[in-house]
Image (tube, helix red, strand yellow):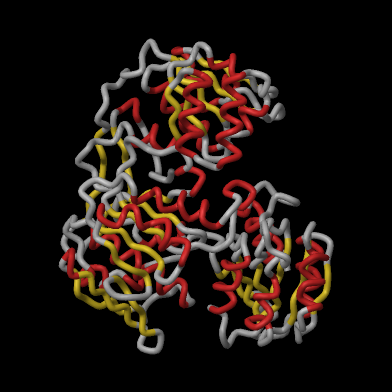
Amino acid sequence: MKLLYLNYAHKTLPLKFIHSPKTTYLRTIQACSPRQDLKGRTVAVVGLGKSGKAAARLALARGASVIGIDQNENLSLLEQDPSFVALTHTGLRTILGHFDWKLLKDADLVVVSPGVPLENYVLANSHEDQCLKFMNYTMGLNIMSLVEAAFDAVGKQVMSELDFAAEVLPKTVRILAVTGSNGKSTVVTFAGQVAVVEVSSYQMEIPCAYFCPSVAVVLNLTPDHFERHKTMLSYAATKCRLLSHMTNARLGLLSFGNQHLDEAIRKYWNKFNLAWIGAFPGVKIDMEAKIASFEVPDIGVASQLQLGGMRATGKHNYYNAAVAALSVAGLDVGVDVEAINSTIEKLRAPPHRMQIVCKDIHGVTWVDDSKATNIEATYAGLMGLKGQKSVILLGGLAKVLYGQASNGFEQLIEPLKSHRSVITFGSSGTLIYDTLSNNGLSIPCIQASNLKDTVKHARKMAKHGDAIVLSPGCASFDEFRNFEHRGMVFQELAFSS
């Protein structure tokens, strides 16, 4: 959940500045719960990545004792983390390694981080009857039943960290929630003049009771995270849960023409005003004129947005900006599309999303699109490079496509044909090279071992006026901590030329 910075101990949620033609002021949301509302209770936080640590910090600030649990034995103890030192007076302990449900016997509440597959913390103790029941539900992929089984297994309330954080927000706050396979961070950045939450499918696996957006957006749905969701329909159903529990439901905005989303959303259609990305009612874009047109009669929106002044390039960024504008207008907080027109030239894509790093002394432009961790994101980035001859860097750890004979990289052959060359790298470099070569790639393609080696080859292949573009189409975990780390290393290599 990306709501910027949460300072519960002071009972405020300071967010970004709001800018409009008439006002500029700091938005601060007052927390709605008493400062120590969890005093005397124990909260178990399962999964101690960024979200888990944030949930643990919030629980401590609310007066709870905290048990932090993670199967990764190599993590550091929360008790030794400097950021937790001031909060440990309420009680804090960390348990790493083998998981046993008995560890939760003292907990009143269990908060699950989005990076934790629920079944992982059941199979470790499968000899118990309750956990066998949990396993059976897991195999059926019925998430609601799965959570109910978790409740049965531990006798505790089970919450996502998203819902746990939303519990302290006042009921008067209107939330814009954005999910999708690609483009979430960019839309959230473009719409960041209001309270916006970027939501992953992992965060929606456990149904929410307190997280209730007024505007919800499902940007798109492409094959991803099959190691977790198994099927496209299951993936779509999890994404569409974002629209199942809205409050002051003004607008639900969905990608037009996706059969999986269409099927998953049917049960919720009567709960919000439906609009489409790419059709009316909703938003459509005239790419030649660079104008976004909005028509949503149910919420009184009929307007246009001039996109020509945007500095972020590509059709996908035009749609990201248009969706952000319509979503903000849908919140009905006094910001309309006409007001957004005056700020369009100030929009910047977030780091590692087709980010122009530099232009070197040889006249080569370096572009960091490390956030492209799947093929569809890379495809969108390539489509935004029309007219710019480039050396394209593809590689890393390719994502699993369950039930498909192909790894999907053949989809890139058409947009690649106008470029200088392709270099593949990382653990899936050979796989990508073979796929492109066997499916008729018409430009030069070579293999490299790692990103550093790839950049060395790219420098030799690029000509004056070209671009070197890192748009991997793969996860980064074979060589890096995350896509941000990969992008930063690429930028360092670019500046070292």
Question: In this rendering, would 13 be left or right of 459?
Answer: left
Instruction: Between residue 235 and residue 422, name the one nearer to us.
Output: 235
Quarter holding the C terminus is bottom right
Examine the image and state in which quarter residue 427 appears: bottom right
From the viewer's side, name the closer residue of 263 and 296.
Answer: 263
Residue 220 in the image, given as x and y percentages of width and height: 46, 64
Q: Residue at x 32, y 36 (%)?
A: 210
Residue 39 % position (x, y): 36, 13
> In percent of the image, x 52 and y 35: which residue is there?
113
Numbered label tally: 0
Q: Position of residue 200 (x, y in %)?
A: 48, 49
| Quarter of the N terminus within the rendering | top left
Residue 35's place in the image compared with 342, above or below, is above
Residue 124 sits in which quadrant? Answer: top right
200 above or below 450?
above
Left or right, 489 with reference to 106:
right
Q: Residue at x 29, y 69 (%)?
A: 343
Residue 348 to residue 267: above or below: below
Tell me what residue is drawn at x 57 percent, y 31 percent.
48
Percent position of residue 184, x then y? 45, 58
